[in-house]
Image (tube, rainbow, N blue to C red):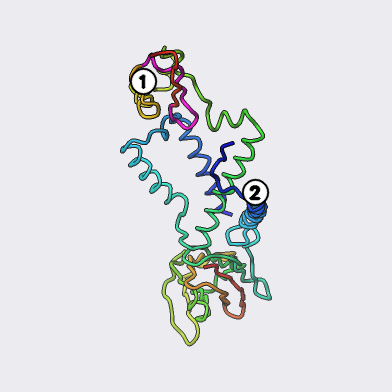
């Protein structure tokens, strides 16, 4: 019983903490993000396993975490609202070459990030070549090319 | 017409979906069982074994896991004021299966005997119920049979250790 409760509590906490950290956190993983993730994983392990190092405990824990994931995915499919709360929503940050400053500031995305995504995904050079840029739910920036410009 | 080069196999896909759903049901059942204590730590696992006269009760985990600390509580209905020492006798066969990490309160001394180990506690001279808690850890997977006695009162119990 304790194993299942531990699993649920840690899962809920991680869900909350990553939601609070914002949608960019896992989108473009920097070296430091990666190190941070490793540290979090290491710290979490202690809380999850406690003093019980049996194989049974490990299996039950994995089963609990995976089951929660499946359960939530089913719920998210049923409820759009819950999906929005848990996974976030896409956000338009550039419209017809014009960066939407307020949205960008709130989402902690700057022009350099958008241009970087534009270069990497579309090979674009300037902001005015971007028709739309959207900050996706997974934190990635998707760019749609402006076919009118040059 | 250009064909998409993808090795789709809808028949196999459907079978894997069925497999997935069956897995979900099994997973849910496994977790429900775990929550109830089938694998230790729930209300299905907590048991009490009493001596025939009821003066000695052992609270133990029927199902538990190896290398995981757990408690074995021995409740004594009555400690007599006249007794100076309280002698809890534990079966040596049980101690081969589990590791006694500690006893609370700490025994005054531990005596080794033939096929048994005796934990001797000093008594303060009051009368009434008392309890001793052992912290034990299973060493091997499988069933262990325990026997704890105080004088003539003897409680037997059985524990299953998951790997």
- In the displayed orientation, state which residue is furthest to the bottom: B114
Query: In this rendering, does residue A135 appear at all?
Result: yes
Residue B105: horizontal and vertical position, in percent?
46, 64
- Does residue B85 sit above or below B17 in this rendering? below
Residue A82: horizontal and vertical position, in percent?
61, 31
In the drawing, what numbered circle is on residue B10? Answer: 2
Pick whichever, A122 or B19, lies toward us: A122
- Secondary structure of the residue carrying numbered label 1: loop
Q: Which residue sits at x=51%, y=76%? A: B87
Query: In this rendering, does residue B124 appear at all?
Result: no
Residue B12: horizontal and vertical position, in percent?
64, 53
Q: Which residue sits at x=63%, y=50%? A: B13
Chain bearing mark 2: B
Chain bearing mark 1: A
Image quadrant occupied by the N terminus of chain A: bottom right
A148 displayed left or right of A126? right
Mark 2 vs mark 1, CA separation in Å: 44 Å
A69 displayed left or right of A43? right
On whether disc 2 and disc 1 are found on a single subunit, the reply is no
- In the displayed orientation, state which residue is furthest to the left: A31
In the drawing, what numbered circle is on residue B123? Answer: none
Give the residue pinned by disc 1. Answer: A110
Give the quadrant of residue A37: top left
- Does residue A16 sit above or below B20 in this rendering? above
A43 displayed left or right of B65? left
Q: Which residues are magenta?
A: A127-141
Q: Residues within 10 Å of mark 1 (few under 14, many from 20)?
A: few
Pick whichever, B113 or A99, lies toward us: A99
């Amino acid at each position: 019983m304790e194993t299942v409760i531990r699993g649920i509590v840690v899962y809920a906490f991680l869900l909350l903490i990553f939601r609070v950290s914002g949608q960019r956190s896992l989108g473009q993983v920097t070296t430091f993000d990666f190190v941070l993730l490793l540290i979090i994983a290491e710290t979490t392990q202690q809380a999850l396993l406690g003093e019980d190092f049996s194989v049974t405990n490990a299996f039950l824990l994995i089963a609990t975490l995976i089951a929660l994931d499946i359960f939530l995915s089913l719920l998210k499919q049923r409820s759009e609202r819950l999906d929005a709360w848990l996974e976030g929503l896409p956000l338009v940050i550039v419209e017809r070459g014009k960066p939407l400053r307020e949205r960008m500031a709130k989402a902690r995305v700057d022009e350099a990030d958008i241009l970087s995504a534009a270069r990497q995904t579309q090979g674009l050079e300037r902001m005015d070549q971007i028709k739309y840029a959207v900050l996706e739910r997974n934190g990635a920036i998707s760019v749609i090319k402006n076919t009118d410009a040059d | 017409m250009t064909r998409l080069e993808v090795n789709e196999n809808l028949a196999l896909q459907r079978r894997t979906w069925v497999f997935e759903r069956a897995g979900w049901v099994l997973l849910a059942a496994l977790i429900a069982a775990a929550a109830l204590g089938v694998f230790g730590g729930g209300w299905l696992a907590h048991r009490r074994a009493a001596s025939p006269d009821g003066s000695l009760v052992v609270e133990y985990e029927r199902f538990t896991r190896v290398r995981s600390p757990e408690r074995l509580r021995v409740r004594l209905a009555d400690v007599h004021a006249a007794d100076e020492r309280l002698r809890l006798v534990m079966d040596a066969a049980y101690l081969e299966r589990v590791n006694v990490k500690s006893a609370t309160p700490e025994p005054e001394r531990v005596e080794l005997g033939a096929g048994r180990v005796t934990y001797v506690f000093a008594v303060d001279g009051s009368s009434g119920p008392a309890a001793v808690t052992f912290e034990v850890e299973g060493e091997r997977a499988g069933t262990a049979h325990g026997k704890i006695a105080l004088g003539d009162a003897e409680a037997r119990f059985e524990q299953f250790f998951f790997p």
